[in-house]
Image (cartoon, grey):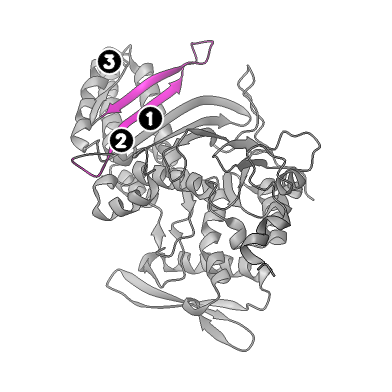
Amino acid sequence: MQEQKIEATKYNIIYATISGIKNIEDEIRIDFLNSTLTKDGKVDLSNKKIKAIYGANGAGKSAIISAFDLYKKVCSVPNYLEQPQVVAELDEIINKKLKKASITVVFAYTKGEKVSNVYKHKISIFHGDIVPYQLEEELYEAKDKNKSNGEYKELLKVKDGSIMTSIQSEFIKKEIAKFEKLKLINSSICSNIIAIVNSLTKFISEEESQRKKNGHLSKDFNEHMIFYWSLLSIISVTYMINVYLDIKDRHQYKNPYFDIQKKLKEKKVSDDIIGLLSNSDEKYYFTSLSDIVLKEEIKEYEETYKKIRDFIKIIKPSLKDIIIEHTDYDKDNYKCRKIFVYNDYRIDMEYESTGIKKMVELYTYIKEAFDGGIVFIDEIDANISGVFLDKLMECFNENGKGQLCFTSHNYYSMNKLRKFITLTTIGETGMVVDISKNGNSNPANLFYNGDIMDSPFNIESYDFEKMFVDED
């Protein structure tokens, strides 16, 4: 095994809290970094890249992944909550009893092993009387470096569509007042990145004029730049998050960052700001369906499928090639079919096995995490067998630049993976238990024997007799 590479990602989720998603009523906390920050701001990131969540059917594993999927969509899709097709989706996700949901994400901006800044972002959604769903509250905070107790400083708060800030600058107040025109009961400020960058560009332009006129920047320059940089940092994390849920109606999904990147470049925004928003090189998240691809991007698309071919060949060596057949869809796009070539036959991917289709879908999500993204995958063991999963996670621990969180039923891998991932279980009442800190105990045995708090597995074989064995 090669020597461990300690390479911190630009952003790392420290923890998240979730309530009101599916069967999760009371707030739960999921820790991603299995350590506390030291007084000098350092954190060990070398063994904290992977989070595995285990639990019985119906415990809430998928609810946790769904929470991050909802967080991603609300924060990256403009006017997401007012889209008609979203209402039915939220009816299935938002807890029926509470009729509201809250998701808070706390993350660190790191340089090497040193934490430079810590931010907190919260969104709360509720089922309204007039409109089906709306954003009740959104909160942006940054840890105040001037406070020894580590308190957070409020940057922005949106309540029922009205926006407020603790920043005293008149310029900032006037600028954020413009954001209220963005329908903030249906949209996160994060989804309106262009408006924020326009505001920042205006500020920088005015500061440059001030410097030329008076020979110095304004006295509020540093406070303003911290405000904008903090806001862009929080937004960048929402674009770095990508979620894989095993759903039937999955279609090709194009990373929204690339359209935003194009618009920002057209506005001649600096590369520093553009680069802040993503670590990803992956444009497409592939499915088993025929994909619509820009003609100018077909070569890149084909190159990616060569990598997918090599990925699948590790598990299925009989695969010889994946051929992309493309036809004109319109003047700008190709419609692409994937043909899988084996020794003595060829098959359209549409008719491939479910397992192979899932491997294709998973590839770009896993690659995203390797490249520095923050990726959540539901029931990863349903698509990758235990032996391959163990080796893949070992490779990710050694080479991955991002964070990867997955749910699983397969407890056999616990003992192998515990060396370099954090293990968490969610119990039948929703209790979250971190089992990474149980010394030398065997986590797989603890899980199997029902020795973990709130575990549903304290059962015996005879418990099934009355359902399946007829009395003589």
- The answer to whether 153 is drawn above or below residue 382 in the figure is above
Residue under label 3: 169
Q: Which range is magenta?
A: 130-159
Residue 12: quarter of image: top right
What x and y, as percent, mark residue 463?
Answer: 68, 55
Majority secondary structure of the magenta segment? strand
Disc sitting over residue 189 in the figure: 2
Give the quadrant of the C terminus.
bottom right
Q: How many marks?
A: 3
Question: Can see residue 78?
Answer: no
Q: CA distance from mark 2 to mark 1?
A: 9 Å
Question: Can see residue 160?
Answer: yes
Instruction: Point out the tag, 1 or 3, that comes first from the N-terminus.
Output: 3
Which SS class for mark 1?
Answer: helix
What x and y, as percent, mark residue 36?
Answer: 63, 25
What x and y, as percent, mark residue 466?
Answer: 64, 60
Instruction: Point out the tag, 2 or 1, that comes first from the N-terminus.
Output: 2
| Disc number lying in front (2 or 1) | 2
Q: The disc labelled 3 sits on which kind of residue?
A: Ser
Which SS class for mark 3?
Answer: loop
- Front residue (pair 231, 205): 231
Instruction: Please say if the residues under marks 2 and 1 sit with CB atoms less than 8 Å apart.
Output: yes
Residue under label 1: 231
Q: CA distance from mark 3 to mark 2?
A: 19 Å
Which SS class for mark 2?
Answer: helix
